[in-house]
Amino acid sequence: VAPIGDQGKFEDIPILKKIAADSNGPRVKGKVVIVTGTNSPLGIGRASAHQFAQNGAKAVYICDFDDTNLETHKRELAVLYPNVEAHTRRFDASDEEAVRAVVDDAVKKYGRLDIFFANAGIVGQPKIFSEITADEFLHTLKINVVSVHLAAKYAAPAMMITSAEKKHPSGSIVVTASVAGLRSNAGSSDYSASKSGVISLAQTMSYQLAGTGIRVNAICPGVIETGMTAPMYEAARSRGTEKKIGQLNPLRRGAHADEVARVALFLGSDESSYVNGQAWAIDGGLSAGHPFVP
Ligand code: NAD
């Protein structure tokens, strides 16, 4: 702890000593982490897997229903972070048996699960609500909301077993919603409804898990350049209007996946030990107010 005041004396405050002792440590040292939606090269899931690996995770499961790049992503983690055990799973995040199996595997191999980042998601229907069929609407809800329910349904008991055995004190479930779940979204009603559902579910589960030490938080990205928004960026580039995408944002820009991944890391780690039941916008301030257009 640095000297306080000009006397060169140290105040004996235990919490400050704790900070000094911890501050340079890897933030998720020894933790076992599952991340869904990790196949997309520019995606939030891949960047987050890297953040967890870079910050000391013992094992990272990278899971996606599209496995085109998963083995490459696994090799890349092994090369960059040799201490991390990376595992791939081709699975549909809305398939109950598949979710149960990956959680079971983590518990069987490591005796613990610390962090589940339920990030997989799809865009909604690009049409007005009245033209969306009930099946289309249900499909978006299934992939975006039921996947989050299943992640928590199997992750929480796994985190509780190991917690009860005192192998580790807590767990963290982080789920990806969207600013579209916080504010209306002119583009896609099924997507907005699904992401509002994700926020509501995360908040409800954080209360229902009271007393377990398990935290549940939702992140709400704004406009991030990933596989999901690639068509929008490509169309804007071909029209020469790419800069317009960030123009109404207070930071006057869009963002890349790593700016979201760093928040997922924080919420997954014990650094956010008293953050629970929250929906965090990561949107450059977009959802803070109405854009002022002089
Ligand atoms: P992305 O398309 O780059 O990545 C999403 C990944 O999820 C893909 O690899 C895809 O194959 C996978 N996936 C989709 N359905 C799945 C399923 N049923 N089971 C397993 N995997 C599945 O997009 P992204 O932007 O990285 O998306 C990650 C999350 O962020 C999503 O939940 C998305 O809704 C959310 N989000 C993105 C933005 C943005 O601007 N990019 C904004 C707000 C929220």
Image (cartoon, grey):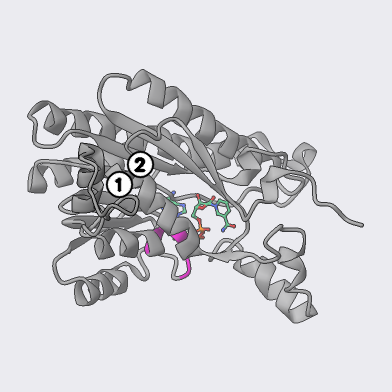
The vertical placement of 87 against 194, above or below, is below
Q: Which secondary structure is most common in the magenta stretch?
A: helix
Q: Badge 2, how many Cα within 10 Å: few under 14, some, many 20+? A: some
**What secondary structure is found at the residue carrying circle 1?**
loop
Q: Which mark is residue 112?
A: none
Mark 2 secondary-structure assignment: helix
Q: How many marks?
A: 2
Magenta part of the chain: 42-46
> As drawn, is 260 to the left or to the right of 71?
right
Based on the displayed image, in which of its 4 quarters is residue 116 positioned?
top left
In this rendered view, identify the residue nearer to me: 104 or 289.
289
Q: Residue furthest right?
A: 294
Rendered location of residue 102, percent (x, y): 23, 46
* Residue type marked 2: Ser
* Residue found 33% across the figure and 54% down from its top: 6
Look at the picture and state if 67 lies above or below 133. Answer: below
Looking at the image, residue 89 lies above or below residue 96:
below
Q: Which residue carries the number 1 mark?
A: 269
**Which residue is tagged 2?**
272
Identify the residue at horizontal 32%, vertical 22% (top origin). 209
Q: Which of 33/278 is in front? A: 278
Please say whether residue 51 is visible from this viewpoint: yes
**Residue 140 lies in the magenta stretch:** no
Q: Quadrant of residue 135?
A: top right
Amino acid found under the numbered disc labelled 1:
Ser
Q: Which residue lies at the image location 18% right of the left edge and 52% below the top edge? A: 21
**Res 92 visible:** no
Q: Is mark 2 within 8 Å of ligand 1?
A: no
47 left or right of 55 in image? right
State the quadrant of the C terminus: bottom right
